[in-house]
Image (cartoon, rainbow, N blue to C red):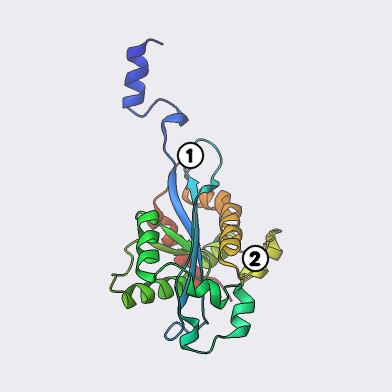
Amino acid sequence: MGWLEGWRKRMLGGGGAATRQPERWIVLDVESTGLDMRRDHLLAIAAVAVHVGQPGPDRIVLADSFDVVLQHDAGASAPDRQNILLHGIGVGRQRSGMPGDQALAAFEDWAAGAPLIAFHAAFDRAMIDRARHAVGLAALTNPWLDLEPLAAVLRPDVKARSLDEWMAAVGLQCSQRHQAAADTLVTAELLLQVMPQLRRELGSRAGMAFADVQRLAAQRRWLPS
């Protein structure tokens, strides 16, 4: 094949799998001072990119990750020692973290409009948006997806609701549960576990419309409890 034919195939998208660019999805997890979305504070955000729709297998890109502890004056109120033991972010790390407005702006820049995925995403989304509002930033405009209902639709054979139950069902392990970076990684691994079923449902071997993935997850409400 001459150079002209090769150029024409590339321009028309017929140059083979190597010409396709992967989509960038972001899996994230947050840590907070508690579970009350109205009163507790965001402590940390961890996230990692997952590349989908590429020539090779869908993959987690560890080099494309984000991890930040937000500055929080734990001395302003009595620290919840049980909560600190759970997530491991002590008073010292809270005080020396990045100022909230800078941390949240940095995450927005890094996410760059990519879809955001979390397990029980409503909590993560509420904590991030509330923290942004507190420092004068608008809510993120990225599309969100809750992995729990999507996994339930794609794997109806698995009777699990919590992340721990899903981990046990599909054989995943987490180095340190309730630590944002570790929880993010195991959530991303669960996403990869259900990607083959997702592609079969959507009939896509390359890219896929994220809105179609969201609609598929919305079918969870029709599944029996």
Q: Could you say which disc has been placed on residue 166 in the image?
A: 2
Q: Position of residue 46 (x, y in %)?
A: 51, 62
Which residue was labeled with disc 1? 54
Q: Quadrant of residue 212?
A: bottom left
Q: Residue furthest top?
A: 2
Q: Amino acid at mark 1?
A: Gln
Q: Position of residue 162 (x, y in %)?
A: 61, 72
Residue 22 against residue 19 in the figure, above or below: below
Residue at 45%, 67% in the rendered image:
218
The C terminus is located in which quarter?
bottom right
Circle 1 SS class = loop
Q: Position of residue 190 (x, y in %)?
A: 60, 58
Circle 2 SS class = helix
Q: Amino acid at mark 2?
A: Trp
Residue at 57%, 73% in the rendered image:
89
Instruction: Give 45 or 38, whichever is nearer the viewer.
Output: 45
Residue 76 against residue 192 in the figure, above or below: below
Q: Describe residue 91's horizontal placement relative to residue 131 as left or right.
A: right
Q: From where the camera sits, is residue 104 visible?
A: yes
Give the mark count. Answer: 2
Mark 1 closeness class: few <14, some 14–19, many ≥20 residues within 10 Å: some
Mark 2 closeness class: few <14, some 14–19, many ≥20 residues within 10 Å: some
Distance, label 1 to label 2, CA atoms, is 26 Å
Q: From where the camera sits, is residue 158 visible?
A: no
Q: Position of residue 70 (x, y in %)?
A: 45, 70
